[in-house]
């Protein structure tokens, strides 16, 4: 199955990885490690809670005005 991965730089270093289709998250010191850990977490999730093909998520960005 093909899943989406969103990687965010973690404040303490490394990366946090999120899979929006299942809600699984993981982290790693590098992008590769974060993806490997996310792949494992997502596989464990799908074993317990099978995922039906509901379509691909739409990933985009948006801006928020912040007052200083």
Image (cartoon, grey):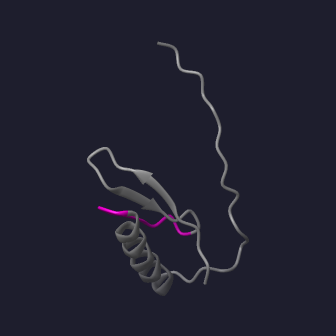
Q: Position of residue 41 (x, y in %)?
A: 40, 75
Compared to residue 31, the image places residue 46 above or below, namely below
Compared to residue 16, the image places residue 62 above or below, namely above
* Pick the front one: 49 or 65: 65
**Number of marks in the image?**
0
Q: Is residue 28 left or right of residue 5?
A: left
- Which quadrant of the figure has residue 33? bottom left
Residue 36: say if magenta: no
Q: Position of residue 18 (x, y in %)?
A: 47, 61
Q: Is residue 57 left or right of residue 36?
A: right
- Give the residue at the far left of this rendering: 12
* Pick the front one: 34 or 26: 34
Q: Which residues are magenta?
A: 22-30
Q: Residue at x 52, y 14 (%)?
A: 67
Q: Is residue 48 left or right of residue 53?
A: left
Q: Quadrant of the N terminus?
A: bottom right
Q: Position of residue 23 (x, y in %)?
A: 50, 64
- Give the residue at the far right of this rendering: 55
- Give the residue at the far bottom of this rendering: 47
Q: Is residue 49 left or right of residue 58?
A: left
Q: Residue at x 71, y 73 (%)?
A: 54
* Pick the front one: 32 or 8: 32
Q: Residue at x 31, y 44 (%)?
A: 11
Compared to residue 42, the image places residue 68 above or below, namely above
Q: Residue at x 63, y 32 (%)?
A: 63
Q: Position of residue 61 (x, y in %)?
A: 64, 43
Compared to residue 65, the image places residue 24 above or below, namely below
């Amino acid at each position: 199955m093909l899943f989406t991965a969103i990687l965010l730089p973690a404040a303490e270093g490394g990366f946090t990885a999120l899979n929006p289709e299942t809600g699984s998250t993981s982290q790693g010191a590098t992008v590769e490690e974060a993806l490997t850990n996310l792949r494992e977490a997502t596989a464990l999730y799908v074993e317990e809670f099978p995922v039906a093909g509901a379509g691909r998520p739409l990933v985009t960005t948006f801006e928020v005005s912040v007052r200083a």
